[in-house]
Structures are given as C-alpha cells and as structure tokens.
Image (tube, rainbow, N blue to C red):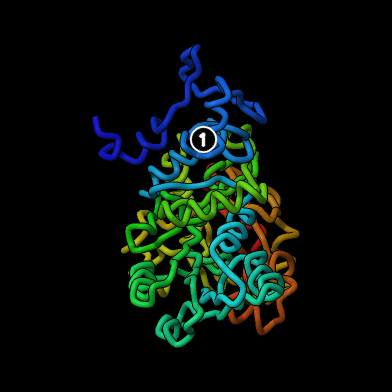
Amino acid sequence: MNEQEFGFETQAIRTHIERSQFQEHSTPLYLSSSFVFDDAEDMRASFTEEKERNIYSRFSNPNTTEFVDKVCAMEGAEAGYAFATGMAAIYSTFAALLNAGDHIVSAGSVFGSTHALFMTYFPKWNITTSYFDINQPETIEGLIKPNTKILYAETPTNPGVDVVDLELLGQIAEKHNLILIIDNCFATPYIQQPIKFGTHLVIHSATKLMDGQGRVLGGITVGRADLIRQIYLFSRNTGPALSPFNAWVLSKSVETLAIRVERHCENAMKVAEFLESHPKVNSVKYPFLKSHPKYEIAKKQMLLGGNIIAFEIKGGLEAGRAFLDKIKLCSLSANIGDAKTIVTHPASTTHSKLSVEEKLAVGISEGLVRVSVGLETVKDVIADLEQALA
C-alpha cells in the first residue's frame, strides 16, 4: 500500500515506526547522546553528509525522526525539525531564515512571546516587523516593502480566537515572493493543513494539543525541504533540539490526536453554545459558532472548530478576576490543549504587559476570558462555568 494514500489516523499511528533488532511493536526509547561508527570511512562520510545517519542527538535521533516524520505526514510537508519548545521553534525558524535588514509582515494577534521577539529582540539585529489587522486583510499588501521576507500569522489566533484566511495569505505570499509561515498550534494538523493553501512552513507548540496531557514541552516546524534545511543547519549549531524522551512521548501522543481532538471540539461547541446564551456574557468567539465573524472562512479551511473559546464577561477586569476566583473544577493555568479544562484571564496574566490600547488592538478586552476546553464530562465543565458566572 502507498503510505501517501493512508488516512490521517493511519499516518499518525503507522508512519516510520523505528524498531531495534528486538522488533518491538512500540518504538523504544533511544536515550543516547551519540552514535558509533563502523570504521574511519563511515565516520568521515557521516560528517561530510555523504551518508544520512544518526551522529549526535542534537542533530537527530531515532525518536525525534519518528515524531517529525509523523507530523510531516499529517501536515503534507516535505521535511521538518523538532525543538525543545514551541517558542524555540518560532525563534529558530525566523532566526535561520532572516538576515539583518529584513522585514516581517505579521498578523497583529500573536502569542505574547512571539510579539516580544518581533518588538524587543529582532530589532537588535535590524530586523523589523509591521503588523496588520486581521479584520482588515486588504491592508497587508500596503505593508510589504522591498526588504520584506516573511508573511506570518496564527489562525485561530491567541487569545482572541479570530480566524485568518489562509487562501488569501497564500495568494499574497506567492504574488510578492514571500515565505508564508503559519502557527497551526490551536488547530492541529487534524483540523487544518495550511500547506494546502500555499503555506511554506507550519509551526506547532507540541506542548499543547499534540501532547494533550500537559506532560512534556516540545515544538516543531515542518514544510518545504529547502527552508527546513536552513532551519536544520541553524539549529544543529545553536542547539534547541527536542529531547529523545519528549519526542518519544509526543510520537505516542499523536497516535490518539484525531480521537482526542474530536472530543475536545465536541465539548467546546457545547460550552460555546452555553456561554452564548448566558446573560452575563457580552460575546463569544468560537470558529464554528455562526456568530463568529469569520465563520465561513473557518468552515472553508477547518474540519472542526478547535477547543479554544474566548468570551467577554460583563463587568470588565474585576468581573473577569472574580470569575476566576469562583472556578472550582476547571484549572487556572497559562497552558492550553490539556485533557483538563483550563481558564485564563489574558488581560491580567498572559498579556498584562500590553497597554490598554495594544490589548484592544488585538481583541483583548478587560473582561476577556480564554477557555481551553478539556475532555471531562462536558456537563460538569458547564456547571462549573455557570456557578462561577452566577
């Protein structure tokens, strides 16, 4: 059978199983920092890259290779590299591809640490960023300069759960010869495959839904082979590699990604519908609610709505904090994508360092609450949210 014809779940479970001479059914852990050579010629050829093989686990390891191959199969990518964290993936991807004087055009709604890279650290190397409003995609081309190299977005966005039109971004990137990079963390490859819409590189924080149980950190970038080659060489020398143990955990985790994500989304839809009908809630953002302003785009490019909901409580900052104080079952945490439902108040936590104007510009009101819906019995999650809103 042709592996490319396999369904998503089969690819996640059966792609590149790395067995030793003992023929394990489940891939064993390869907890080795380095690998030995047969002879002097084998060693020489390996270091000159005439021969593809494992040399040192900072470069590659059977466990990380299996994880990368699985995500590549799920995303429809040519190659990939796995990182210690999602932010290591984002930083290393940009740092490998950019030179001093280059320019990025990015959606304004990005993760707080990504914003810090763009606004605080990259300018030290004369790399600048212009933000576009995701609700005004017609402004993107006006931001592109002769030195623009990368077009970047998250979709759905963090934490406002807005949706960016991948097909439109692909068309703009092709027209202006830009590298299109998409953070697909909120959707996962099961819900959305940006490469189908013209994306060149896809980034994930594997810490989130890919692991799905809050156990390990990890990140991954997959996409066009020539770009991944540059990222690999940069990372081979700078050392942000994923550990073999975490790669082994993540490779097992993605085997159940589809079935977990389906339940996450089923639960999230019910929670979103409950919140939308609640008198103390001003508004709810969930991609598969018909009230979402980008509902049609979400239906075009996403299989399901994801597990993240953003909603605004009436009463602003103090109402948001009071709501969190009343939560009993759900967790108060900065993570997402766990089996446990997690509630966060971005204005006072993850995005507290932004000014009021900066928060509003990316859709973060003082009463905004982000819910990462887990796998509990959904009526219990709803009951907890209901009593906290009461």
Q: Residue at x 36, y 49 (%)?
A: 76
Q: Is residue 195 above or below residue 294?
A: above
Q: Residue at x 61, y 65 (%)?
A: 111
Residue corresponding to mark 1 = 251
Amino acid marked by disc 1: Ser
Q: Where is residue 362, by image quadrant?
A: bottom right
The quarter of the image holding the C terminus is: bottom right
Please state the horizontal and vertical placement of residue 73, each as a whole percent of the image.
38, 42
Q: Where is residue 351, by image quadrant?
A: bottom right
Nearest the viewer among 36 and 115 is 36
Q: Is residue 159 above or below residue 33?
A: below
Q: Is residue 13 above or below residue 23?
A: below
Q: Is residue 169 left or right of residue 30?
A: left
Q: Residue at x 49, y 68 (%)?
A: 153
Identify the element where label 1 is drawn. helix
Please state the horizontal and vertical placement of residue 368, each as a whole percent of the image.
62, 70
Nearest the viewer among 372 and 242 is 242
